[in-house]
Image (spheres, rainbow, N blue to C red):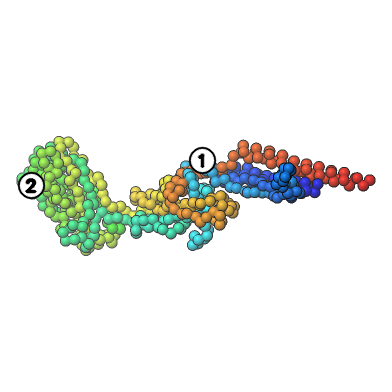
Amino acid sequence: MMRSMFSAVSGLKAHQLKMDAIGNNIANVNTVGFKGSRVTFQEVFNQTLKGGSAPQAGRGGTNPQQVGLGVDVASMDTFHIRGAVERTDYNTDLMINGEGFFIVSDDVNFLSRSYTRAGSFSLDEDGNLVTPDGLKLLGYMYDPETGRMGTALEGLQMSKGITFPALSTGIPVDEAATDNSNVPTGVIFGGNLNADTKSIDNGITITPGTTTLDELVDADGNSAVARDTTFSVYDELGGIHEVRLAFVKTAPNKYNVYIVDKDDMIADTPANSTPYPIEFDSNGRVQNYNDLILTLSPETGTLLENGARAFSFKVDLSQLTQFSNESDASATNVRGYKQGALDEFTIDPNGVITGYFTNGEERPVGQIALANFKNPAGLEKIGSNLYRVTPNSGEPMIGAAGTGGRGALNPGALEMSNVDLSREFTNMITTQRGFQANSRIITTSDEMLQELVNMKR
């Protein structure tokens, strides 16, 4: 009777522990990234009353006689099955569509690391991607100097202080080769020059620094200027400068390109004083094309007003056409931009964070790292949706999302709890009945002991 009572006590303890696990699962049914657990039982050990024997002579063998001495917890397993998807459309909410864990840390050197499936991140004051408890999300930051992602894990920072350096349309004059072979193509022109434009009268002489566009008109008031257009270029400090070009028709299929100043006058600058000729064939395409190199320089000295150096750049006019249609020739592609600050960012399925800057440019800012384990069930829960490594989980295998068996990211979504309420309520019923049955064993054994005591009367 004592054996049955103590077996029932072990049953009460085991079923109470299982009910604790069920209660925790149900309590976290709406916890982001939560992984449900289960409890399994095993028999503790048996007391052998009589051992088994082999058949002998005419007598058969006998089986062992044993009495069980209760139940114990065999395992407490965590189900690492992906939960349901909740769409949030918030760009710092992330879900792992497959295996893997986010890596977070509250250590200055990022050496103390924890792991989580909960992707509800936000930005702190410094632009760090952090968990609700302030742990930093780890990954690789982009190095603009090398044009590559870093190799050391560090906190991912989307600070508004991240800048995109200015890029000049050209190259400083003092760095250009004598033959201008290293001057970059800074401006590409496209569009049309009207073939019906009247050619300039032979009696009109264009003198840079003296002649204005208004003077390039014949006796009937027809202008020889096929197109007058302005575009902007950038110096090495990101300063914006306007350049104005006029296409003057000198003969059928032939034009001269001039720089025009703010007073509508053909500019007289030492570097750009010679007009640039351009000629079209009978099909309206540019022929005999040579590079047009312009130099933006101050009237005196070598520095522009903002301190940037004078610079030269090529203008590509090879894509122009000449047809009997309105003139719409203009700069379709200009190299360079001013300095920009980080404005917005997006995260792609591979975890690459792309920054969009106020100068209209974009580039990678960083990449989120994921960790995978040979035995995720071996991880230890430490609260706040976090796990840590144990000897049975194996060391983390760290890399980019979508590689090495790690799942891709689903930005703008969260992974919900994987708890199945129907299963939990079913387990609750069977656990409750098991607890009741074991308690009945205790009361029944007590009654039997009472009867035994009463035999003395």
In the image, residue 261 above or below residue 284: below
Corner quadrant of residue 216: top left
Q: Which residue is mark 2?
A: 204
Q: Amino acid at mark 1?
A: Val
In the image, residue 126 above or below residue 40: below
Judging depth in this view, the residue of 37 and 64 nearest the camera is 64
Q: Which mark is residue 144?
A: none
Judging depth in this view, the residue of 192 and 180 nearest the camera is 180
From the image, state whether disc 2 or disc 1 is nearer to you. 1
Q: Amino acid at mark 2?
A: Ile
* Drawn side of residue 74 relative to residue 317, left or right: right
Please state the horizontal and vertical placement of residue 53, each as a whole percent of the image.
72, 47
Q: Which residue is mark 1?
A: 85
Please state the horizontal and vertical placement of residue 377, each as a whole percent of the image.
56, 50
Corner quadrant of residue 32: top right
Label 2: which secondary element: loop
Residue, x 47% and y 42% (percent of image)? 89
Label 1: which secondary element: strand
In the image, residue 35 above or below residue 141: above
Judging depth in this view, the residue of 12 and 302 nearest the camera is 12
Please state the horizontal and vertical placement of residue 303, each as a whole percent of the image.
25, 62
